[in-house]
Amino acid sequence: MKSRTKWQELKAMKDSDIDVSEVPEVDAKVFKTMVVRMPQPKELVSIRIDPDVLAWFRQQGGRYQTRINAVLRSYVQAHSR
């Protein structure tokens, strides 16, 4: 997927141009109650995939392995009900 972010406009912006009026203040008190949740590491496996299927995922761009995982997760969720 191609990014729709207007990078040149963002690079040209100054910090003072950013509207932060709706962003709540974060102080030390807030950090004391925060919990850091680290994602579980993925397992490294070897899997055989048909060449045309792998080629299709690779054509979608980088992070194709993440997309394959997302497709497999959707299948599992759909069949776990």
Image (tube, rainbow, N blue to C red):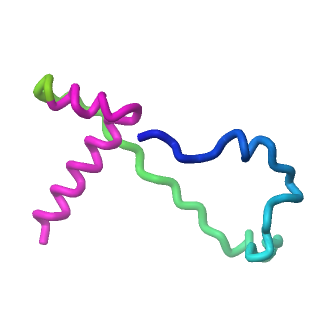
User: Does the magenta segment cover residue 42?
Assistant: no
From the viewer's perspective, is residue 51 above or below residue 63? above
Residue visible at 16% across and 31% down in the picture: 53
Which residue is nearer to you in this view: 19 or 73?
19
Q: Residue at x 41, y 51 (%)?
A: 40
Q: Tell me the quarter of the picture where residue 20 sits.
A: bottom right
* Percent x, y of residue 80: 13, 66
Q: Is residue 21 left or right of residue 71?
A: right
Q: Is residue 57 left or right of residue 40?
A: left
Q: Is residue 80 magenta?
A: yes
User: Can you give x and y, in whole percent of width and height, for residue 19 in the image?
Assistant: 79, 67
Q: Position of residue 32 (x, y in %)?
A: 73, 72
Q: Which is the main secondary structure of the residues drawn in magenta?
A: helix
**Number of numbered discs on residues:** 0
Residue nearest the observer in this picture, 76 or 31: 76
Quarter of the rendering containing residue 77: bottom left
**Residue at 41% of width from left, 44% of height from top?**
41
Looking at the picture, does residue 3 appear above or below residue 21?
above
> Which is more toward the observer, 55 or 46?
55
Who is closer to the viewer here, 15 or 39?
15
Query: Which quadrant holds the N terminus?
Result: top left
The part of the chain drawn in magenta is 53-81
Tell me the quadrant of the picture where the C terminus can be found.
bottom left
Horizontally, is 54 left or right of 4 in the view? left
Kindly give the residue lying farthest to the right in the view shown: 16
Give above or below for 54 relative to 68.
above
- How far across and down, in percent of the image, does residue 24 sit? 76, 76
